[in-house]
Image (tube, rainbow, N blue to C red):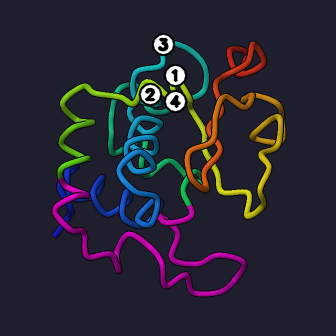
Amino acid sequence: MAYTDRELFARLLQCEAGGEGDDGLRGVASVVMNRTTVPYGEFFRLVNGDIRSAIMQINQFTCCKEVVADQYNPQNIYNMNPQQIHYDIADWALGGNTLGAVANSLWYYNPFSPTCASFFPPNGTGIILTRINKHCFYIPTQKYAET
């Protein structure tokens, strides 16, 4: 049975930001929603307003991969068991809310270090905006508009 958009979103939130607290979860949820509403660039063309397309876009979220570097990835959305907080934040985001601290960020990642890279992805389409707990959040550059 296919997951509903809400269930898929809650699973992604648990997997991608389960240990990041409310603001970390809301930041990740905001990035997903920003990808559904950005009016230009790659996400506009590929996602076109669809939450499921944003979540399942190829090579965007490690948690959507069952295999990473030729190894089984046990931390994937299919193995998650979301708690009420994950559903609540999914509902919050699906209701049109975003976390102001991440503004229009389209990317985030955990650098596993105390500092964030200036640009992410490495192609320079995003520039650092803020850090929330372990995740660095990036807003689009002019280069993204050309994607």
| Image position of 140 (left or right of 7) | right
Residue at image position (49%, 85%) is 74
Q: Label 2: few (<14), some or many (≥20) within 10 Å?
A: many
Spatial CA distance of label 1 from label 3 is 11 Å
Q: Nearer the viewer, mark 1 or mark 3?
A: 1
Q: Report the residue marked by disc 4.
A: 102
* Circles 2, 3 touching at the beta carbon (< 8 Å): no
Q: Which residue type carries mark 1?
A: Asn
Image quarter where the N terminus lies is bottom left
Q: Report the residue marked by disc 1.
A: 104
* Circles 1, 2 touching at the beta carbon (< 8 Å): yes
Q: Which residues are magenta?
A: 62-87
Q: Nearer the viewer, mark 4 or mark 2?
A: 4
Q: Report the residue marked by disc 2.
A: 34
N-terminal-most mark, 1 or 3: 3
Any magenta on residue 68? Answer: yes
Residue 8 position in % (x across, y down): 28, 57
Residue at image position (35%, 28%) is 98
Q: Nearer the viewer, mark 2 or mark 3?
A: 2
Q: Report the residue marked by disc 3.
A: 39
Residue 83 position in % (x across, y down): 21, 68
Q: Answer above or below: position of 140 versus 63.
A: above
Spatial CA distance of label 2 from label 3 is 10 Å
Q: Answer above or below: position of 58 versus 122.
A: below
Q: Which residue type carries mark 4?
A: Val
Disc 4 on helix, strand or loop?
A: helix
Image quarter where the C terminus lies is top right
